[in-house]
Image (cartoon, helix red, strand yellow):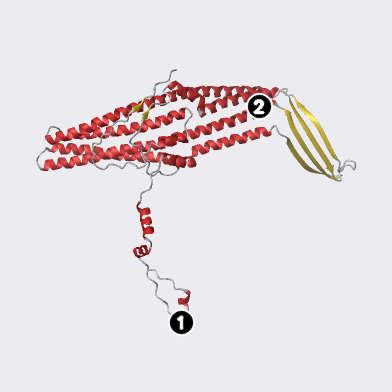
């Protein structure tokens, strides 16, 4: 039991201790507040958290993604390497102070300094050019990492939506099978059907329960995949709006997309710049055979008992030019040149491999968009047909023309058709984003364009029998293919 602390006045001798004031109930406290404040407080406690959209998830990922941060760190490292390469061409100034002791003459102090400036050194100059080219290449790799982040966020976002749609379908099938088991049991108890219908319905129901548990695990993994990018578990995500226009890629020519990808993709640009840096490193290795010329300014001052009186405190300055001609280095110079050539050839092969891979990837994503459009059309038609078939099967069951097995199969077909339609819609939007990534035009504006296609209100999880709400298939706007 907690006792109230007495005040200072009550603790003084001769003063009575007043009893503690009882705690005021929460309801009476809220009754003293203005009505508007109480309404706002209750509304804030009762309203659900707003659903997150694609741009909000991307902003979280951009601030917390370690892959993008690592690409920026590599660029910073290369920038410092370029600074170090430039420093080899700038003046180098050193100073040295030494003191020596001899047995007979005593101490001697010597202060020297040396200032050198490279005048001609093609090897260092080409190395600096290579370092600057690599900085530009790392800038392109950072742009590629940013586009890759957009693609990874979109892939994970729609992966969660796919898993949610599959879970909604699985839960709907499970609920319907449960209701059908209850109806079959009622008919059996009234001696209107055989026990076979009950057992068969129960078998479907148990299989549906196991499938729902597996799909729920897939949804959790999809949410973890999104949290891996953003660093936090996502909340409710906004789904795609029901009305989604189906548009052909613009331009409607795969070769035009391939040409744009080979020209604008930042990963290919970085690989091409790496080849240019390799050429400059080969030139630097070949220039190692050439003479170098530098200017120098040396100074010296001696003092101490061991120094001759005429030299003590005297400052000597020497200015000169230094010409260095490499003659023989044991074969190291030639070996470094061959090594640079091999590295350049490897970079060229990597560039060619990347170009071929990008050509294939661009064509595959273009075909994926067309395939998704086709699947959206066929899945939309399948949904309408499945809903009509389900309604007919229910009527036939009431008339005794259909069996319970026919009804269960019709329900499963209708739910799977709706799920296939949702999956095709997600694949269509994601394939267009991946096609833009291959073409080198994926960024935040493209994500903002997709964000306008999201529904502001999340789709609730169905918990009852799916109703026959047929939605017409959206019209397809066909873009005529461009002439090659």
Give the residue furthest to the top: 484
Q: Is residue 443 visible?
A: yes
- Whether residue 187 is situated above or below residue 436 in the rendered picture: below
Q: Is residue 73 left or right of residue 467?
A: right
**Among all residues in the image, which is located at the extreme bottom?**
14
Left or right relative to 301: residue 473: left
Mark 1: give few (<14), some (14-19) or many (20+) Cα within 10 Å.
few
In three-dimensional space, the C-alpha distance between marks 1 and 2, rounded to whole angstroms, equals 96 Å
Q: Is residue 405 visible in this depiction of the protein?
A: no
Mark 2: secondary structure = helix
What residue does disc 1 label?
A: 14
Q: Between 371 and 404, which is closer to the camera in this rendering?
A: 371
Q: Is residue 220 left or right of residue 132?
A: left
Quarter holding the N terminus is bottom left
For disc 2, the neighbor class at 10 Å (few under 14, some 14 to 19, many from 20) is many
Front residue (pair 152, 258): 258
């Amino acid at each position: 039991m907690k006792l109230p602390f007495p005040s200072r006045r009550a603790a003084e001798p001769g003063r009575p201790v007043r009893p503690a004031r009882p705690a005021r109930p929460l309801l009476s406290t809220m009754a003293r507040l203005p009505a508007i404040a109480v309404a706002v407080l209750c509304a804030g406690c009762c309203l659900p958290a707003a659903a997150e959209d694609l741009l909000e998830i991307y902003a979280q990922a951009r601030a917390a993604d370690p892959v993008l941060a690592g690409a920026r760190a590599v660029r910073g490292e290369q920038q410092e390497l370029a600074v170090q390469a430039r420093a080899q061409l700038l003046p180098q100034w050193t100073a040295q102070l030494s003191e020596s002791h001899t047995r007979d003459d005593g101490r001697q102090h010597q202060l020297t300094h040396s200032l050198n400036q490279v005048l001609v050194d093609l090897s260092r100059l080409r190395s600096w050019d290579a370092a600057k080219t690599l900085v530009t290449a790392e800038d392109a790799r950072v742009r590629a990492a940013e586009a890759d982040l957009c693609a990874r966020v979109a892939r994970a976002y729609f992966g969660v939506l796919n898993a949610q749609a599959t879970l909604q379908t699985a839960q709907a099938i499970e609920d319907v099978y449960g209701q059908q088991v209850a109806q079959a049991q009622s008919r059996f108890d009234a001696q209107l059907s055989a026990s076979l219908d009950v057992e068969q319905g129960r078998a479907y129901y148990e299989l549906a329960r196991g499938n729902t548990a597996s799909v729920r695990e897939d949804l959790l993994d999809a949410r973890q995949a999104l949290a891996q990018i953003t660093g936090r578990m996502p909340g409710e995500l906004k789904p795609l709006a029901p009305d989604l226009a189906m548009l052909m890629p613009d331009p409607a020519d795969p070769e035009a997309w391939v040409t744009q990808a080979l020209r604008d993709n930042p990963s290919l640009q970085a690989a091409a710049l790496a080849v240019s840096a390799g050429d400059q490193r080969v030139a630097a290795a070949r220039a190692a055979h050439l003479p170098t010329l530098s200017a120098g300014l040396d100074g010296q001052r001696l003092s101490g008992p061991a120094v001759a009186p005429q030299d003590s405190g005297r400052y000597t300055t020497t200015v000169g030019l230094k010409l260095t001609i490499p003659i023989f280095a044991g074969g190291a110079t030639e070996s470094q040149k061959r090594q640079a050539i091999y590295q350049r050839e490897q970079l060229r092969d990597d560039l060619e491999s990347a170009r071929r891979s990008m050509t294939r990837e661009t064509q595959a994503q273009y075909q994926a968009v067309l395939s998704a459009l086709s699947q959206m059309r066929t899945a939309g038609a399948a949904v309408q047909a499945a809903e009509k078939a389900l309604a007919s099967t229910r009527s036939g069951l009431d008339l005794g023309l259909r069996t319970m097995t026919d009804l269960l199969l019709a329900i499963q077909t209708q739910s799977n058709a709706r799920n296939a339609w949702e999956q095709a819609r997600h694949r269509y939007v994601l394939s267009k984003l991946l096609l833009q990534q291959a073409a080198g035009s994926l960024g935040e504006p493209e994500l903002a364009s997709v964000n306008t296609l999201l529904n502001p209100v999340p789709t609730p999880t169905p918990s009852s029998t799916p109703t026959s709400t047929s939605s017409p298939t959206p019209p397809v706007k066909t873009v005529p293919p461009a002439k090659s």
